[in-house]
Structures are given as structure tokens and as C-alpha cells.
Amino acid sequence: MESKDVSLLIEKIAAANIPLKLSTCLLQFNDEDVSIYIQCLCAVRLFARSSSAIKCGPLMVCAAILPTDTRVANQAVINIPLPAPIDVKSGDIIDNLRLFKESWEVYVVASTLEKEEEKRKVAVLLSAIGSECFKLFQNWPVSVEEKRTVQGIFDALGRFLAPQTNNRYERAIFNLAKQESEEDIDKYINRLRKLVKNCEYGTMQDR
């Protein structure tokens, strides 16, 4: 490796805050391999606060994604954990959606998913939003065109989870409500009555 290349890699290592004890290890790899490491390390730091955080140190990450075969390294990067699912039951739902979208945008870059075809991106996104949100999504009148793109899915999520269309969300919650194992029939009926109040069914809710 030429001295100018070494200098460039040192600059990249410093910019990425990679521990100095890894410098010697990293300099034996080419520029593409080091870029992959930096990308993955940044992703590890981003998800470190989530429940799906990677439980390993920088040395383990380095060993995992810096093999001599770059194709294997690329596969390791793809195994970055998904963003935490959208919480549709507590807190500010729109804010939860915003945070999820920001995490998703970082994920698609760090995992190299951005290079995949749209059909695969959509499948991964629907897997990432979480089972509760996915159940709601299935009950919404989303067009076929929207379901085919990531942007279309985010548009639908924003539209149906937004406060101004909250009755659609409440109706979906009501339709999915099932009697819990610890609920007797009276408690279940009372819970349904509370849920239906936000559905704007009019006189139908009294039937």
C-alpha cells in the first residue's frame, strides 16, 4: 500500500472515531474494506440504544466484516438489525412514525438495501414496521400502487395514522380487538364499548 493511501485510510479511521488499537489491523485492508467497516461501525453506534442493539465490541465487528473476500464482507453488512417496530399503542404515534422513518433511511444505506429492487425493499419494510402496525395496514384501504413502493407505504402510514384521520385508526383497533385470556365477557364488552366511542360510527355503535 502506498504512503498516500495509508494517509487517506488514517484520515478515514480518525474521522470515524475508530479506536487507535484497530488502526494497524485496518491498514492491511484495501480502501473498500475499510469503507465497509466504517459504514457498519456507524450503524452499530446508531442502533446501540435500541432493543435490537448488536451485542459486540468494535474488534468483533472488525473480525466479522473484514474478511479478505469483500463479497462476504458485504453479506455481513446486510445483517445489520432492523429498526425498532413502530409503536402504535402508546406515546405520540406520528412522532413514533417519524423516528421509525429516520431510522429506516439510515438502515437502507448501512445495510446496502438501497441497491436492491423495490419489491425487496417493500418486503423488508413491511417486516420492520411490526406485527401490530402490519395488522392495521392490512385493514386500511391502501391502493395497489401505494403497496408497491416504499414511499407509497410511508404515505399510507402517515395518512392513516395522522390525527385528522384518527377514526380510521380507531376502527382498525376496534375490529382487531379480541378477548384476552384474563378478561371475562363483561370486561371484554366494556373495553369494546370504550374503543367504539372513537370510531365515529354514529348511531350504529349503540346496536
Image: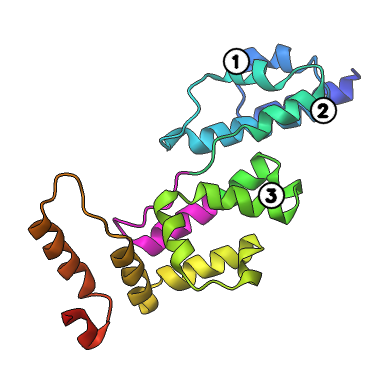
Label 2: element kind = helix
Reply above or below: 196 against 134: below
Regarding residue 16, the answer to whether it shows in the image is no
Query: Residue, x 47% and y 31% (percent of image)?
Result: 53
How dense is the environment of label 1, judged by Cα within 10 Å: few (below 14), some, or many (20 and up)? few
Magenta-highlighted residues: 84-103
Residue furthest out toward the left: 186
Residue occupied by mark 3: 120
- On residue 59, which mark appears? 1
Q: Position of residue 110 (x, y in %)?
A: 65, 40
Verify whether residue 98 appears in magenta: yes
Question: Which residue reaches farthest bottom?
Answer: 203
Measure how far apart labels 1 and 3 are at the Cα level.
31 Å
SS for tag 1?
helix
Residue depicted at x 76% and y 24%:
72
3D distance between C-alphas at marks 2 and 1: 18 Å
Circle 3 sits in a helix, a strand or a loop, which is it?
helix
| Residue holding disc 2 | 31
Q: Considering the image in quadrants, where does the C terminus appear?
A: bottom left
Observer able to see residue 18? yes
Image quadrant in which you'd find residue 34: top right
Q: Circles 1 and 3: CB distance less than 8 Å?
A: no
Residue 149 position in % (x across, y down): 66, 63
Dot 1 amino acid type: Leu
The residue sitting at 51% across, 20% down in the picture is 56
Viewer-closest of 149 and 103: 149
